[in-house]
Image (cartoon, rainbow, N blue to C red):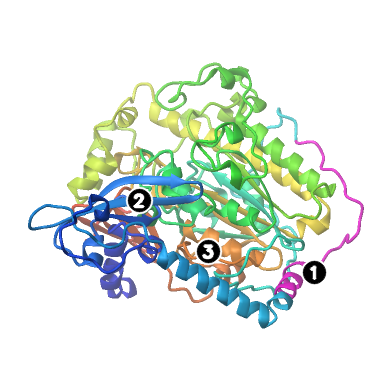
Amino acid sequence: MRFLARLPPLLLLLGSVSAGIGVAVADDVVVGPPNLDCAEDEDAAFVTVRGNVRDCSWLRDKLEVDGDVDLVEKQCEGTEASSVCRVTCGTCGEAIATDTGVSDEPATTVAEEQEQEQEEEEDAGADAAEAGSLEEVGSGLDVENDGAEATAATEPPSPTAAPTPSPTDPPSPTAAPTLSPTASPTASPTAAPTGDSRGRPNVLFIPVDDLNNWVGYFLRHTRKGHPQSMTPNLDRLSAMGLSFTNAHASSTICNPSRTAVWSGMRPSTSGCYDNKDYPWKPFVQEGLNLNAHFKNRGYYTAGSGKTHHSSQEGMEGPEKIYTSEWSEYPKVVKKGRAAGGYGPFEGFLSEVIEADKVLDDDDPDYHTVSFCIDRMKEDAEKKRDGKPFFLACGLVKPHLPWVVPQRYYDLYPRDTVQLPPYVTTNQWKEWDEAIMEDLKDVPEYAIQRMANPDKEYTDILRMNETRRWEGAIQNYLATIAYLDMNVGRLLDAFEELPQEIQTNTIIVLWSDHGYHLGEKGHHKKQTLWEECSDVPFIWVVPNVTTPGTICDRPVDLQSIYPTLCNLTGLDVPDHVDGDNIRPLLEDPDAEWDGIATVTMGRMNHAIVDQRYRYIRYEDGSEELYDHDNDPNEFENLA
């Protein structure tokens, strides 16, 4: 059992993650040799740490003091984020002079070293190397219509067009775009930014909210998914490239998950653990996010919808995004009932009101896709002086409320809806017994903090007369179908672009976390179990991914930042966590010893490999599941 043999180092990994000390923070601490005399000058007792941290206690060992080191405040001046810690003597309780103040000598030294390395690279002909890298990434493309006149995308499908797919019939794989297979840049983290990005691939980036593994490709290739879910356009995207069936969110709630993807830093590095840690900006220095990295290297960066947590206000909500990191980011459009606001739990704890009056273009997601279609057309019309685009299309559905046009509900008649796999009867007394049987070997901490059996969300599991549980599943499936329609509109427009754009564009679709629909007696998110961390993760990379391929290797969403940098020939910043998964994109069966790490709150973590899921909670309690023999995680082996 290879996983069990690796448990000691994995436990060590969990310990380092739980400490909450980011590598970038630890390496950039501004400290000098401590002076253990009590300080006459109170200011001398303060140590400034680069970045925003939640705990300064780890500085005790670094400063070699036996007193306390407490977080005083977080600061942000321009693009410089820092934290101030106060050091006190363990004997007298007075301030200790550390001789550190706010010295920036280490940072200056790093900058000098980088400048020196840069000069050495230039002396060695770095300019020629850069030109060669650009040629590999861009000019090795197989362009069928090179020089062809740009054509505009056709209008999106009619809002009244309803999907009529079979969940068992996958689409035929389409021809793969053809980025040069020889382009495998391994840029140094110290590589200088460049404003000349011509020839680099475009990126179409599609974050989705609250989408679990109820997507067609999961059902066809694993024992996961929902047998009634119909997602022809997500399956169409899957057929264009490579899809992961063992990919996991870095956190299982929106704010820390999205902060982790965009910043490249795990929650244990940034300190952003929960939706309560919102706004996220105090945890991430301006200029570190993925879109900022691309913008600083010559990309046109545009976004719409929910990319970062609660970013729908765009440039009009500067407290929710760094406006300097985007070239363009409009506020979302709402129409119809959406403009007036739906009930927050409509379709979940209550029935949908007048679904027959809801239109496709009422929802902001429809207009988010329209914006992205327009920006792709602009690229086809060569309106941006050769700049490649990084285009983020942030789709909110299937997040609550589950309100969509009536025809999507009609796809899943309520009296035919299938409940989670462990439920074999609609006799509710027996179901309650099944839930208790499922939870009997789960630690009490997990029952109270993760399953939350006493929350109002679980009431729907007992409302057997109104069949609200079946209604919740019906409405979630319907909202996924609405999402799928919008993905189809985006793909239709993409496939109308000139070949030189299609064959030079990377597409990445990911969900910020999964979702429970009654498994382990839980609804919604915020757990470390499979239903909540396992997410759709699809890559289409010209001439790197093979159409219609599936990869079951364990990965997490921290891989996005370093992998996109690699594929586009950009440097990977020093602060970025995560693995470059390009080897798996090229060969899904490649040897892989990576694992996925999932966090839900401070010191609550799961690690997933090819076969097992191991969970360790803040109180030290544990769970271990063997997915080969127990894909539903019924039996805790810990």
- Circle 3 SS class: loop
The CA span between labels 2 and 1 is 45 Å
Q: Earlier in the sequence, mark 2 or mark 1?
A: 2
The amino acid beneath tag 2 is Ser
| Magenta stretch, residue numbers | 130-156
The CA span between labels 3 and 1 is 25 Å
The location of residue 287, given as percent across then percent down, is 54, 52
Relative height, residue 270 to residue 525 (above, below): below
Residue 573: image tag: 3
Residue 83: image tag: 2
User: Magenta segment: does it hold 143?
Assistant: yes
Judged by depth in the image, the label closer to the viewer, 3 or 1, is: 3
User: Magenta segment: does it hold 370?
Assistant: no
The amino acid beneath tag 3 is Pro
In this view, the residue farthest toward the bottom is: 124
Residue 139: image tag: 1
- Circle 1 SS class: helix
The location of residue 401, given as percent across then percent down, is 48, 28
Quarter holding the N terminus is bottom left
